[in-house]
Amino acid sequence: MRNLSYGSSFLREVEARVEEGEWVKMCMQCGVCAGSCPFGPHWAHSPQKIFMMIRAGKREEILGSDAMWMCTSCYNCIVRCPRQLPITHIMHGLASYAHRLNLAPKGQPTREFATMFWNNLARKGRINELKLTLGLYFKDGLASGIKTAMGMQSVGLGMLKAKRLNPLEILGGHGLKDLKGFQAVIAKAREIEDKKQGLAS
């Protein structure tokens, strides 16, 4: 059997540019993470497989995979890993890196939601739940949105009664008092992340 190189250029890229990526080479391929994951039988590449593929230099296959986006942050893998690898953080780090390189799969539901959630939050420093909900409902068009909204009307009414949904938020909603300060923090964080990931101009 051909030996795989554990010093691939993609492994070095992950170590340098992905959150907690330096831990990937510590995986001993025991499979505990795959067996502990509630989605284990349903995704194409478990963390165990992803780490082996990184070592094998399968860059396009990994960054174009939807596997990282399947992680629900249950942390079962971290708790049970005999080497205490920060597997959840690595999975999210890979997903973020693929997204920033525009290599993540198009139309992946978790990616779409994460992008909409972040864009919603970044505008005013607080989530506008009504706009986020409407954005999710109508992302596939007017007819699909109306159908989804009708199917969820009991949930919406429940949220209104519990004062968890304010119809006036459609006008803009409330934001942070120091919005400029918040946006400056976000800009600085992006600058640091771009520098780390080699995306700075």
Image (spheres, rainbow, N blue to C red):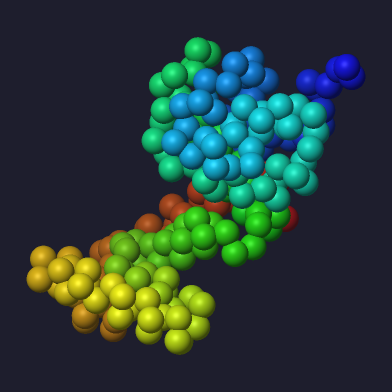
Within the image, what quadrant is residue 123 found in?
Answer: bottom left
Residue name at image x 46 percent, y 65 percent: 116
Residue name at image x 66 percent, y 30 percent: 49
Tell me the quarter of the image containing the N terminus.
top right
Q: Residue furthest bottom?
A: 142
**Placement of 105 over or under 198, stated as above or below:** below
Q: How many marks?
A: 0
Q: Residue furthest top?
A: 82
Q: Position of residue 177 (x, y in %)?
A: 26, 64
**Placement of 165 over or under 122, stated as above or below:** below
In this image, 161 relative to 140: left or right? left
Q: Can residue 22 be seen from the camera position used here?
A: no
Q: Position of residue 100 (x, y in %)?
A: 63, 54
Q: Position of residue 196 (x, y in %)?
A: 64, 40
In this image, 127 relative to 107: left or right? left
Tell me the quarter of the image containing the C terminus.
bottom right
In this image, 133 relative to 82: left or right? left
Q: Can residue 97 be seen from the camera position used here?
A: yes
Residue name at image x 58 percent, y 21 percent: 31
Q: Residue furthest front?
A: 41
**Placement of 168 over or under 25, stated as above or below:** below
Q: Residue furthest right?
A: 2
Residue name at image x 31 percent, y 75 percent: 151
Q: Position of residue 194 (x, y in %)?
A: 63, 48
Give 2 or 183, whichever is nearer the viewer.
2
In this image, 117 relative to 194: left or right? left
